Image: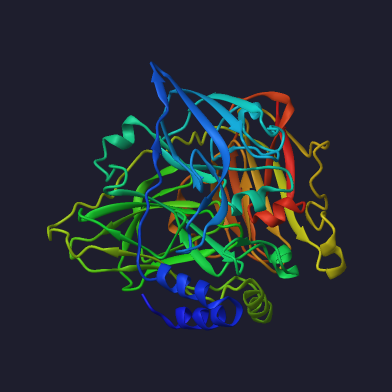
Amino acid sequence: MVSRRRLLQAALLTALLPASLVQAVARAQSRNTFQVPPLYTGRKEGKDRYFDLQVQSGSAEIIPGYQTPTLGINQPFLGVTLRANRGERLYFTVENRLPKETTLHWHGMKLPARADGGPHQPIAPGAVWNSEFTIQQPAATLWYHSHQLHQTGVQVYHGLAGLFLIDDEESQRLNLPSTYGIDDFPVIIQDRDFNRDGTLQYLTTMRDRMMGKRGGTILVNGVVSPLLKVEKPLIRLRLLNGANARIYRLEFDDHRPFKVIGSDGGLLEQSRDARSVILAPGERAEILVDLSAGGVPILRHRPHNQRSPQREMSMMQRMMGEQDQFDIFQIDATGVESKPVALPTYLVKSSVDRSLPVQAERTMNLQMMMNPARFLMRDQFAINGKSMKMSRIDEVVNAGAVEIWKINNHTMMPHPFHIHNVQFQIIKRDGQREPHEFGFKDTVLVHPKESVILRIQFPKHRDPHTPYMYHCHILEHEDQGMMGQFVVV
């Protein structure tokens, strides 16, 4: 798995870090085992399911020989994988064992605002928060993470994030790979920087604040350069871009095709052939990979072109580090039995009711200040000219309404736009859609100077007093003001 990128990175590390840490990073990049996060299904009583979660501090040996202080949920680093079924009533007890305030947000879930886990549901140190809701959406790969006001970036960066899987009967009838950790694998992709002592390095430059934090070391499920040994000829990868800011263009080094079967909101109506997929922070995609021919393919991030004037694109790519190429992880399929695999085409039927009238149209203008003097201030990013204020409700939505939202990016860099409590459809964007963009989404990448039009049907969870969020999912932008609030009435 040695590449030109690796050699350049090793040279940089040699210049900046002590020899012992350079050697440890080199060892980590050559022989780590793919780690599958523990699966936690809670306690089931009829249609009710109970989860006990502890937000805690810990340490992890991410770089061999170095203990890195971390945060986690029910483990030292990152969160356990939660799993439940459509139609079940979920009860969460979340205990905050940190010396600081935090939250846990159920990203992608349709649920009452008071159960959302956003900035309005903080958990004080030593306190317990209870969240309760019924799963009213189809099988999907969701996730959960800290959403603490102005602290989301640093808390997620240190480990407060994990996967949340929903199952249903329709998906189980499709005979897809579904044995967790055997042929169905979570792949949480993140990037991190490390200090000389092995601790995580966060926000050390103006570029980190302006562009979002992008690290030079790739982690998969908290592990550097893992090797996944598989025995099944067909595997399912549940890809999550859990990074703070980096956009990944994922493809295999041998350019092998794969099937895209799912997006943020669940399975697509039919699978789509692809050789690469672009995921912005917060986005998910499920893919099927045929390994019946064996081999040792590498999933890799390759730089992608932004949709902006050439001079702006070149400048922004350099500032954002998007010209870098990374290996994500390697698959060892040399022990797989060679036999044909069945790749599905038709998956699930769409639940969209196209007869419902559109009740409202809204425009969201994403904006950022380019005055360097302002980067010592918090409110430097905005939506519709306003930075986030907890006391201000920006939009009021009717329960069950169908709305059209137009997201305009007035900046020179891409922004992933996320809306709480919904799974929307992209009905128009400039340029070609990614394969996963034909399904239901809760996060959409809006390129520089681009407009994207969304169709949203809001669930019938009414609460005139407790808002949901919409925001950029570059976490440093969210923390610095690119976030608004809406209530459903």
Question: Residue 133: image x %, image y %?
Answer: 54, 24
Left or right of 345 in this view: 186: right
State the residue at coordinates (30%, 68%): 297
- Which percent across, then down, holds residue 58? 55, 47
Q: Residue at x 20, y 56 (%)?
A: 233
Image quadrant assignment for residue 40: top left
Front residue of 306 and 298: 298
Up-down: is 49 above or below 125?
Answer: above
Q: Is residue 18 above or below residue 87?
A: below
* Number of numbered callouts drawn: 0
Asked whether residue 83 is in view, the answer is: yes
Work out which quarter of the rendered image holds the C terminus and state it. top right
What's the residue at 47%, 51% (across, down)? 284
Q: Residue furthest top?
A: 46
Q: What residue do we see at 52% from left, 83% from top? A: 11
Q: Considering depth in this image, is 120 or 307 the residue closer to the camera?
A: 120
Q: Indicate the quadrant where residue 314 lies.
A: bottom right
The residue nearer to you, when weighing 56 against 94, is: 56
Q: Quadrant of residue 205?
A: bottom right
Instruction: Give the camera-side residue of 486 and 100.
Output: 100
- In this view, 84 is above or below 34: above
Looking at the picture, the colour scheme in use is rainbow
Q: Left or right of 228: which side holds 367? A: right
Q: Residue 445: x percent and y percent?
A: 58, 57
If the image is split into quadrants, where does the N terminus sit? bottom left
Left of 132 or right of it: where is 391? right
In the picture as drawn, the residue positioned furthest to the right comes out as 373
Q: Can residue 399 be seen from the camera position used here? A: no
Location of residue 145 in the rendering, given as x and y in whole percent from the top left corner: 57, 43
